[in-house]
Image (spheres, rainbow, N blue to C red):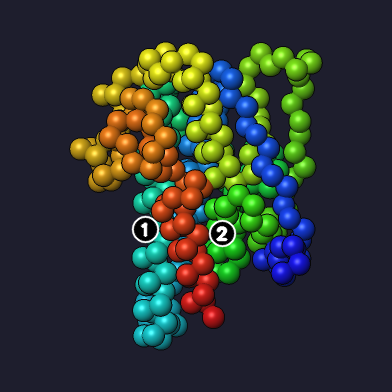
Amino acid sequence: MTGEWVAMSGEAKSDPSAEPVLTVDTREELVYLLGQACEIEHGLMCEYLYAQFSLKRGLDEGLTEAQLVRVQAWEAALISVIKQEMLHLAQATNILTAIGAAPHFERPNFPILSRWYPAGVQIALVPFGERALRHFIYLERPEGMALDDAAGFAAAEHAQPLTVGDARLVAVAQEWRTVGHLYRGIEAGLANLCARYGEDAVFIGPARAQAVTEIFEWPELLAVTDFVVSPVSSSGVGIMLPGCGCGFCRGHRGAAAGCGDRCG
């Protein structure tokens, strides 16, 4: 290897720059990032659902029996990822509730033509195929991996917010690049606020208002009551969120890559 990265389009790239640090000094900034996380999970879920429903369903649509078996395997993989996106949305919502904010279920309507998200993050409904799989893998890529998004996903130029000096009066948009980057910023922000103010002052929301395993099917869906940097926590924020190198994130990329391997 020569120190270059090969993009999915085949173009070699130099080592990607490090992710910019997401600054979280106030509860409002943390609420803003968690709102972004809820929106991106909601949007990704719509992308995966659209890809699933674009698949052919039977022999009467021109599939052979062998092709039908393959398509059904693709659909099963997509359904698994869709359920995980629902879980991630619930987990992000629990953290919002735990810090005293309201659940966030808003998202921009499709097609998203404005600069709603940072440059390089585009959400669109694409039928199942190589282009959709490349786009899924691009959004779920780990830190430091240089990939090109699928054809047609040219990012809009990002507009910088107007601020007076370095002092910020309200939360403003920040340059997160991937789903994992966003969650790492949320994790660091939670740690920063807990260290500064104490967990009792950060986690002020009622645990009874959160979605938990007794209500939904996921054993990972726990009420958030404190901050624990651990893959599995009985009560705190378990950092088992997309993009952190956990099984969820690897599972999403693996599912998409696996479907792509079988497309040929």
One can see residue 114 in this view: no
Q: Quadrant of residue 53?
A: bottom left
Mark 1–mark 2 Cα distance, whole angstroms, equals 15 Å
The circle drawn on residue 96 is none
Sequence order check: which comes first, mark 1 or mark 2? 1
Q: Position of residue 130 (x, y in %)?
A: 58, 69
Q: Which residue is mark 2?
A: 137
Look at 56% across and 18% down and name the residue there.
26
Report the front residue among 58 and 213. 213
Residue at 47 percent of width and 63 percent of height: 254
Q: Quadrant of residue 103?
A: top left
Query: Where, quadrant-wise, is the N terminus in this rendering?
Result: bottom right
- Asked which quadrant contains residue 6, the reply is bottom right
- Name the side, left or right, on which 216 lies relative to 195: left
Across and down, in percent, residue 9 comes to 71, 67
Q: At x 58% / y 42%, what residue is drawn?
A: 181
Q: Is residue 233 left or right of residue 182?
A: left
The local secondary structure at tag 1 comes to helix
Vertically, is 75 above or below 107? below
Left or right: 83 in relation to 140: left
Tell me the kind of residue under disc 2: Ile
Q: Is disc 2 placed on a helix, strand or loop?
A: helix
Q: Nearer the viewer, residue 27 or 1?
A: 1
Amino acid under disc 1: Ser
Q: Which residue is mark 1?
A: 80
